[in-house]
């Protein structure tokens, strides 16, 4: 199966521990909300779905981090996720993590790697 890159945003739009960029992606035959963030100097992408109940986690569009900028937080349940791995760190996610997406940053742009 071949892969292709889809442009998501300019690198400058993502500040470490700051707002994320939302987008839609195809997942298991359906269009699903997703997002990219920058943390620890690296780009990370996830489906925008809490592991507890499949609802979007941002408390306002693009606001995924808690007030410290260290954890991703579900606005509804308060579940905390590791921004580097999507792993559940506490709350109602019950050990389940966010679903990661393959993303890459190159030449000032962020791309989603999609399978064809």
Image (spheres, helix red, strand yellow):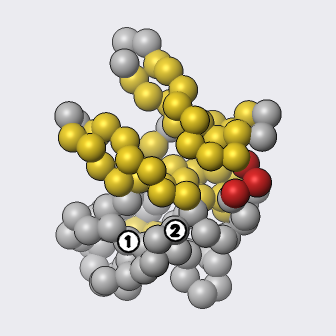
**Residue beneath disc 2:** 62
Q: Position of residue 38 (x, y in %)?
A: 66, 58
Q: Position of residue 73 (x, y in %)?
A: 45, 77
Q: Position of residue 54 (x, y in %)?
A: 22, 64
Using the image as rendered, state which of residue 102 and residue 86 is in the foreground.
102
What quarter of the picture does the C terminus occupy?
A: top left
Q: Position of residue 2 (x, y in %)?
A: 43, 12
Using the image as rendered, state which of residue 83 and residue 9 is in the foreground.
9
Per the image, label 1 sits on a secondary structure element best described as loop
Q: CA distance from mark 2 to mark 1?
A: 10 Å
Per the image, label 2 sits on a secondary structure element best described as loop
Binning the other alpha carbons within 10 Å of mark 2 as few (below 14), some (14 to 19) or many (20 upward) gives some
Q: Position of 51 compared to 40: left or right?
A: left
Query: Which of disc 1 and disc 2 is earlier in sequence?
Result: 1
Please name the residue shown 64% across and 85% down the image. Answer: 68
Q: Nearer the viewer, mark 2 or mark 1?
A: 2
Q: Is residue 84 visible?
A: no
Q: Are discs 2 and 1 less than 8 Å apart at CB?
A: no
**Residue beneath disc 1:** 57
In the image, residue 89 above or below residue 7:
below
Please name the residue shown 67% across and 70% down the image. Answer: 17
In the image, residue 88 above or below residue 77:
above
Please name the residue shown 72% across and 48% down the image. Answer: 11
Q: Is residue 66 visible?
A: yes
Q: Position of 64 compared to 11: left or right?
A: left
Which mark, by number, is residue 2? none
């Amino acid at each position: 199966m071949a892969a292709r890159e889809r442009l998501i945003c300019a690198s400058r739009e993502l500040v470490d521990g700051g707002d994320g960029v939302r987008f839609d992606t195809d997942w298991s035959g359906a269009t699903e909300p997703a997002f990219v963030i920058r943390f620890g100097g690296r780009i990370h992408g996830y489906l925008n779905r809490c592991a507890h109940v499949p609802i979007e986690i941002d408390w306002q569009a693009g606001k995924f981090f808690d007030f410290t900028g260290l954890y991703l937080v579900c606005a509804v349940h308060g579940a905390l996720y590791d921004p580097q791995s999507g792993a559940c760190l506490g709350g109602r996610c019950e050990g389940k993590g966010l679903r990661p997406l393959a993303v890459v940053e190159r030449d000032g742009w962020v791309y989603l790697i999609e399978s064809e």
